[in-house]
């Protein structure tokens, strides 16, 4: 059965839980997206911008020294960090902005946590001359001032969100409020495989290029499929982007790495899939960090891009059905991963990505020699240098 | 008969329209919420909407966001709100609907929430982030227990959706006067009047209008077209202004009376 179903469900997860004001738009968007996704002219245009503007395909780099350090693993890095704007996020914003143009929308809004999605949205809005408003938690604005400056340079208006926990979830609330108000001229570019149907589907389709390329590249280099795929999971777009093309390759293990923050036994983590009961937030049903009354809890991670109490519904489905396994890595280990890749390969990863890299140490201990792994190197770490400087 | 349905039947017989007042349960505390509901009954309010505070009120503007936060800081939750309604019921038969985001109800358990509602004397649920397409279970449990389920029609709703929304609704249908979040507006679009009429042509069920309505003049205009008018943020603002004052209930009720007599 194709997932999601017609109502946008991945098993019990997903769906459309939004105010009625948005329902007609979402139904229309779903129709338009499904038609465009099959339309050759649209696919060609999307492929053109991915290639000529974003810099695809990205390399699948064999990280030899990293592998030697980990002893048992052969590690390949899918270099999404080399894309324009420095992360996988641009794949999705290019796709959505092209949809927005076809729908005649003139104004782009987006939420952002680490600022990577905000920068990618502002970049594509600038590319097509569209008005762009970015909602960002006041707390994140402090943590990621460089990205705020970049968005402003790109002509976007950055609105600090001071409600709630002042982080990504509150930025998304505020973006939804804007969207409800300006639904007729505004296109909301959601940055992850989250939100109401058709967003989890649409974002997955735009990010699926990561896995499609990686699968082909790996087959060309190794003449077989990898044993494991590893990617960090906040909302889950880079992980779904890598995983999806391998969904039917039953022998390929998928490991999503969440942020354990200060520890899974504390309240300060972002391990939604591991610790969150099923709930509804931001338009879809999925795992959700919440208290005994169903109030959403504040997430924590040293990586602003993982600092989200929700997660994409398709990941919840992958976990429930056992297709993917989800683990968590704490702040300290992530910083170790950050340093490890910088020293061994001369690549400074994003702090989000560093969680996936840190998990390799655990995976290496459990693996036979020669085990092959593709890690989605979802973003570069320039934006995190200040944060790390403060910690070290 | 369900208290909400009965209320609309009575009003219809008298040729009257409903005035519906929204307050957030637990703002500034549940004792005040109980006193307000009882005083509203005497002040010409036909139905009380009790807001269940939620951490992420994405359909609400700043006034109700702040009110939800105050209520949550008091430790307000569904259990305590059901207790509060039970106390109101000892003295009043005023119809009460809970206005809540979906997650607190989903987490509580839909079937369990409907049972608790029956026991406490809650008459209906209004869930702004639960479109009727996702509400199959809730509607099923609610129908069995004779509890109202109110769904929304917005200015952007395509005509084909109106019938299923009306079918899922019991008690009344909530017409959203504007595209946007809750909160008082100086000027409201006249398009809403046409929108309300369009819905009323497609259903026998009462259609009530809310969002943005904050003055007696606005109440008057909208009560001509709709079967009822809902005011929320303006009343919550009146509560906010009176926090810490002993005459909070008296002052808020005076404000509400001005609105309810404009119907």
Image (spheres, coloured by chain):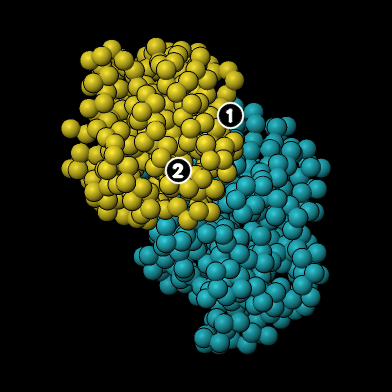
Chain colours: A cyan, B yellow
Q: Which residue is mark 2?
A: B32
Q: Which mark is residue A64?
A: none
- Residue at 36%, 47% in the rendered image: B84
Tell me the distance, in whole angstroms, between the alpha carbons under discs 2 and 1: 36 Å
For the view shown, which residue lies furthest in the front direction? B246
What x and y, as percent, mark residue A386?
Answer: 80, 64
SS class, disc 1: loop
Give the chain letter at badge 1.
Answer: A
Whether tag 2 and tag 1 are in contact, CB under 8 A, the answer is: no
Q: Is residue B14 left or right of residue A159?
A: left
Asked whether B140 or B242 is in front, the reply is B242
Which residue is pictured at 61% across the width and 70% down the height?
A261
Other-residue count near label 2 (Cα within 10 Å), few / some / many at <14 / 14–19 / ≥20: some
State which quadrant residue A43 falls in.
top right
As drawn, A117 above or below A373: above
Which of labels 2 and 1 is toward the front? 2
Residue in front for this viewpoint, B248 or A148: B248
Position above or below: A295 against A349: above
**Percent from the top left, x then y, of residue A192?**
56, 51
B149 sits to left or right of A159: left
Residue plotted at (61% across, 64% down):
A300
Residue A20 can be seen in this image = no
Is the residue A216 above or below the residue B16 in the image? below
x%, y% of residue B193? 44, 14
Residue identifier under label 1: A182
């Amino acid at each position: 059965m194709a997932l999601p179903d017609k109502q946008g469900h991945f098993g019990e997860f997903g769906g459309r839980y939004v105010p009625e004001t948005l329902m007609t738009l979402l139904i229309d968007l779903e129709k338009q997206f499904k038609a465009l996704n099959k339309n050759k002219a649209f696919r060609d245009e999307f492929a053109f911008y991915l290639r000529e503007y974003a810099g695809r395909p990205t390399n699948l780099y064999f990280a030899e020294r990293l592998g030697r350090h980990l002893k048992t693993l052969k590690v390949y890095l899918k270099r999404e960090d080399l894309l324009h704007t420095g992360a996988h996020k641009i794949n999705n914003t290019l796709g959505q902005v092209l949809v927005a143009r076809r729908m005649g929308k003139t104004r782009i809004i987006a939420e952002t946590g680490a600022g990577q999605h905000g920068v990618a949205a502002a970049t594509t809005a600038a590319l097509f001359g569209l008005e762009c408003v970015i909602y960002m938690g006041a707390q994140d604005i402090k943590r990621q001032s460089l990205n705020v400056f970049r968005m402003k340079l790109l002509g976007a208006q950055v609105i600090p969100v001071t409600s709630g926990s002042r982080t990504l979830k509150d930025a998304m609330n505020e973006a939804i409020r804007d969207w409800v108000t300006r639904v007729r001229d505004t296109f909301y570019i959601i940055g992850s495989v989250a939100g109401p149907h058709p967003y989890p589907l649409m974002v997955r389709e735009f990010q699926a290029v990561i896995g499609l390329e990686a699968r082909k590249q790996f087959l060309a280099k190794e003449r077989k499929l990898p044993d494991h795929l590893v990617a960090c999971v906040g909302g889950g777009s880079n992980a779904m982007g890598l995983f999806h093309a391998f969904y039917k390759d039953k022998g390929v293990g998928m490991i999503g790495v969440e942020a354990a923050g200060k520890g899974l036994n504390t309240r300060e983590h972002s391990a939604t899939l591991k610790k969150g009961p099923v709930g509804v937030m931001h338009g879809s049903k999925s795992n959700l960090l919440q208290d005994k009354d169903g109030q959403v809890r504040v997430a924590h991670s040293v990586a602003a891009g993982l600092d989200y109490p929700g997660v994409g519904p398709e990941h919840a489905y992958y976990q429930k059905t056992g297709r993917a396994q989800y683990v968590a890595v704490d702040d300290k280990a992530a910083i170790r991963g950050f340093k490890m890749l910088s020293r061994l390969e001369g690549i400074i990863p994003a702090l989000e990505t560093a969680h996936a890299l840190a998990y390799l140490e655990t995976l290496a201990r459990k693996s036979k020699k020669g085990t092959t792994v593709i890690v989605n190197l979802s973003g570069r770490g320039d934006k995190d240098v200040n944060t790390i400087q403060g910690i070290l | 008969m369900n208290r909400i349905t009965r209320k609309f039947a009575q009003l219809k017989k008298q040729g009257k329209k409903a005035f519906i007042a929204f307050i957030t349960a637990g703002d500034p505390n549940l004792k005040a919420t109980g006193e307000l509901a009882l005083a509203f009954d005497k002040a010409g309010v036909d139905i009380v909407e009790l807001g269940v505070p939620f951490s992420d009120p994405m359909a609400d503007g700043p006034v109700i966001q702040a009110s939800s936060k105050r209520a949550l800081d008091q430790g307000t939750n569904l259990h305590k709100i059901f207790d509060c309604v039970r106390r109101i019921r000892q003295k009043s038969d005023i119809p009460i609907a809970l206005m809540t985001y979906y997650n607190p109800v989903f987490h509580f358990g839909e079937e369990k929430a409907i049972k608790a509602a029956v026991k406490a004397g809650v008459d209906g649920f209004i869930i702004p982030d639960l479109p009727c397409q996702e509400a199959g279970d809730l509607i099923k449990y609610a129908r069995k227990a004779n509890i109202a389920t109110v769904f929304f029609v917005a200015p952007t709703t395509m005509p084909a959706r109106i019938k299923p929304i009306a079918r899922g609704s019991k008690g009344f249908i909530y017409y959203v006067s504007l595209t946007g979040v809750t909160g008082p507006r100086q000027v409201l679009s006249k398009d809403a009047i046409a929108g309300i009429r369009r819905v009323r042509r497609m259903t026998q069920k009462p259609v009530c209008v809310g969002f943005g309505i904050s003055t007696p003049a606005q109440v008057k205009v909208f009560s001509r077209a709709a079967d009822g008018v809902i005011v929320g943020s303006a009343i919550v603002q009146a509560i906010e202004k009176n926090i810490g004052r002993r005459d909070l209930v008296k002052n808020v009720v005076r404000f509400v009376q001005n609105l309810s007599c404009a119907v």
